[in-house]
């Protein structure tokens, strides 16, 4: 910070500022080490053979091995299948959610119709209900429909989000009506206007929400654990903890588990690297989520 | 939009076609997929859970109306209170350090004299990119008695995951590590949106950094802070993954001494006590409402002082 005081000799400030700055960077670097260390160990330990992890849990591998990654694909009918399940569930659900929300948000943002305010207020009111609370109701209904142990029971219940509707509507409100007006004058129909004008114009909001939704679905643990009890339908995050206590013998095979953890984290890291700005924006808007 | 263009549109557009804004049926067509999905997937199950909570129901056969019995039974259930106590423990003891660290880091990184922001920001956020299950498993390997990194580092033999009194704190450590990055980004966004002139003005007025924090930054960040604390309280009620996966080595679920309240719902459902599971859900809903309301009150009172 700029200092406006003059009576203190300048060298005092230079030294104290240097120390402050030094300590500040020290704190930041320490934080980075703490955040980074577990992630780095996850990656490093995934390249160690089983016997080495216990001898040397914290260092670099003495023998780098791809054994764990090869084992992933043929272990217990294949973790790879569970990884693909996760991808299918999260991607499909994000797509459905974005389309449903965008359609609804467009009507709420740009059309005037009877009951608009009331309907919107009622929807917002339900945002205070945490999703976990309706799990018993959802579980009984889907169990009766015979949907347990399917992918669709893991996709659909998460795919309707009032928060998404609200967030995308807020963004669409900022898009000028003239844009729609122009398309309308050019003879475009309602749906064409939505599809070709409104959707591209709301991309920043749609992208940020899609990322948020994807993250939520990918990390979802409780619901899939309840509705998918057969291994071939489980997403990867449900299978990984089972590896800890179903190993032969008493000691879990950490190398394999860490490789699975890397696999379960990889898609999120890739999305992050590709869309870092959207991603961090989705965090900020997500904080408003109920 | 300028006044003249507004007038122009009002005149020219209806000549070409009927105004799109006044269309009667079309908006309902646009919202109907969402509303339909909402009714089928959210509101329907929610109301169904409410109804079921007044019945004894095992998923098959007949439903017996038993009034508020499920609610009373839950409130007398020892494991429910234990779960609630554990959840509150996790909430308080992870919330305070996590929020303090996140806010402190955001203050530091938002300072315009700090270089390498493009490096620090994603690095501090990094733990959020690791799935909850994966981070719990990594920490579960760190907390091992003989081979765990943490005990080797400390040169001790702390039974982190064996003694429940330590396991509680292991869960808290994991929650803090995983959560800081999220709130850091939220606070950073709030702090960078503060008009720099206000800060400059307070410096000219001779405020030191502590005064600036208390009298300038906190009031400006008030809404963000209220939101963060209320949201984290609601989020904490849902804690499930961390304790259970951390203790997965002991056979799947966390032992009841450290199990969060959601575990009660989970095991009721698993045991086919659907009425009780639904009652637990609605009791948790009431607790959430109460906790958010109380926090809003507290913060409003604090802000007025």
Image: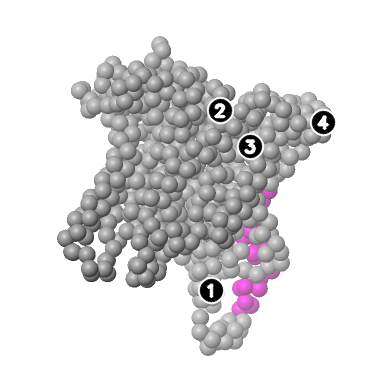
Q: Residue at x 29, y 47 (%)?
A: A28
Mark 1 or mark 2: which is in front?
Answer: 2
Residue B136 image offset from top left, x and y in percent: 43, 31
**Do marks 3 and 1 share a chain?**
yes
**Do marks 1 and 2 share a chain?**
no
* Chain of residue at mark 2: B
| In-front residue for pair B129/B69 | B69
- Mark 4 to mark 1: distance in Å? 55 Å
**Do marks 3 and 4 share a chain?**
no
Few, some or many residues within 10 Å of mark 1 (<14, 14–19, 20+): few
Please give left or right for residue A279 compared with residue B300 in the image: left
- Mark 3 to mark 2: distance in Å? 18 Å
Please give left or right for residue B38 compared with residue B161 in the image: right
* Chain of residue at mark 4: B
Mark 4 or mark 1: which is in front?
Answer: 4
Q: Residue at x 57, y 44 (%)?
A: B234
Give the residue number, with chain letter if any, for mark 1. Answer: A177
Going from the N terminus, do you reach mark 2 or mark 4 first?
4
Give the residue number, with chain letter if any, for mark 3. Answer: A135
| In-front residue for pair B234/A189 | B234
Give the residue number, with chain letter if any, for mark 2. Answer: B259
Q: Single out the residue that lies furthest toward the top.
A: A249
Q: Which residues are magenta?
A: B17-41
- Mark 3 to mark 1: distance in Å? 40 Å
Is B19 colored magenta in this rendering? yes
- Mark 2 to mark 4: distance in Å? 28 Å
**Do marks 4 and 1 share a chain?**
no
């Amino acid at each position: 910070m700029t200092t406006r005081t003059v009576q203190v000799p300048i060298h005092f400030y230079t030294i104290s500022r240097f120390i402050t700055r030094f300590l500040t960077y020290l704190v930041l670097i320490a934080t980075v080490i703490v955040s980074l260390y577990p992630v780095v160990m996850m990656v490093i330990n995934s390249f160690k053979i089983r016997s080495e992890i216990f001898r040397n849990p914290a260092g670099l591998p003495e023998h780098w091995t791809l054994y764990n990654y090869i084992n992933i694909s043929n272990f217990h009918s294949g973790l790879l299948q569970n990884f693909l399940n996760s991808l299918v569930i999260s991607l499909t659900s994000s797509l459905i959610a974005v389309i449903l929300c965008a359609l609804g948000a467009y009507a709420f943002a740009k059309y005037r119709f009877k009951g608009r305010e009331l309907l919107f207020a009622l929807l917002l009111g339900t945002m205070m209900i945490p999703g976990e609370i309706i799990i018993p109701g959802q579980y009984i209904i889907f169990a009766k429909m015979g949907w347990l142990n399917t992918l669709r029971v893991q996709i659909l219940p998460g795919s309707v989000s009032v928060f998404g509707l609200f967030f995308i509507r807020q963004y669409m409100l900022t898009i000028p009506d003239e844009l729609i007006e122009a398309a309308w004058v050019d003879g475009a129909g309602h749906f064409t206007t939505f599809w070709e004008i409104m959707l591209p114009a709301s991309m920043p909001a749609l992208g940020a929400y899609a990322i948020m939704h994807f993250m939520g679905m990918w990390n979802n643990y409780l619901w899939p654990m309840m509705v998918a009890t057969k291994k071939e339908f489980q997403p990867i995050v449900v299978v990984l903890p089972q590896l800890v206590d179903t190993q032969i013998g008493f000691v879990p095979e950490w190398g394999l588990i860490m490789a699975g953890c890397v696999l379960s984290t990889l898609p999120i890291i890739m999305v992050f690297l590709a869309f870092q700005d959207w991603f961090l924006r989705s965090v900020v808007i997500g904080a408003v989520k109920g | 939009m300028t006044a003249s263009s507004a007038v122009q549109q009002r005149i020219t557009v209806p000549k070409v076609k009927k105004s799109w804004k006044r269309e009667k049926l079309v908006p309902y067509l646009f919202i109907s997929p969402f509303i339909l999905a909402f009714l089928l997937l959210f509101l329907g199950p929610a109301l169904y859970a409410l109804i079921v909570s007044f019945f004894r129901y095992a998923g098959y056969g007949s439903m017996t109306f038993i009034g508020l019995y499920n609610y009373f039974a839950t409130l007398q259930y020892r494991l429910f209170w234990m779960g609630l106590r554990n959840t509150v423990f996790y909430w308080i003891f992870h919330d305070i350090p996590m929020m303090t660290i996140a806010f402190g880091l955001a203050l530091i990184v938002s300072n315009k004299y700090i270089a390498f922001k493009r490096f620090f920001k994603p690095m501090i956020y990094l733990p959020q990119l690791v799935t909850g299950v994966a981070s719990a498993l990594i920490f579960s390997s760190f907390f091992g008695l003989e081979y765990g990194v943490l005990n080797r580092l400390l040169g001790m033999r702390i039974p982190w995951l064996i003694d429940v009194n330590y396991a509680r704190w292991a869960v808290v450590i994991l929650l803090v590590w995983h959560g800081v990055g999220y709130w850091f980004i939220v606070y950073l966004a709030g702090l960078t949106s503060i008009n720099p002139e206000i800060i400059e003005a307070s410096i000219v007025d001779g405020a030191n950094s502590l005064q600036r924090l208390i009298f300038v930054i906190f009031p400006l960040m008030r809404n963000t802070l209220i939101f963060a604390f209320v949201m984290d309280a609601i989020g904490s009620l849902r804690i499930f993954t961390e304790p259970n996966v951390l203790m997965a080595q002991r056979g799947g679920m966390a032992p009841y001494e450290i199990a969060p309240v959601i575990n009660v719902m989970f095991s009721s459902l698993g045991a086919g006590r659907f009425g009780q599971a639904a009652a637990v859900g609605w009791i948790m809903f009431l607790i959430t409402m109460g906790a958010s309301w109380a926090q809003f009150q507290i913060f409003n009172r604090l802000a007025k002082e």
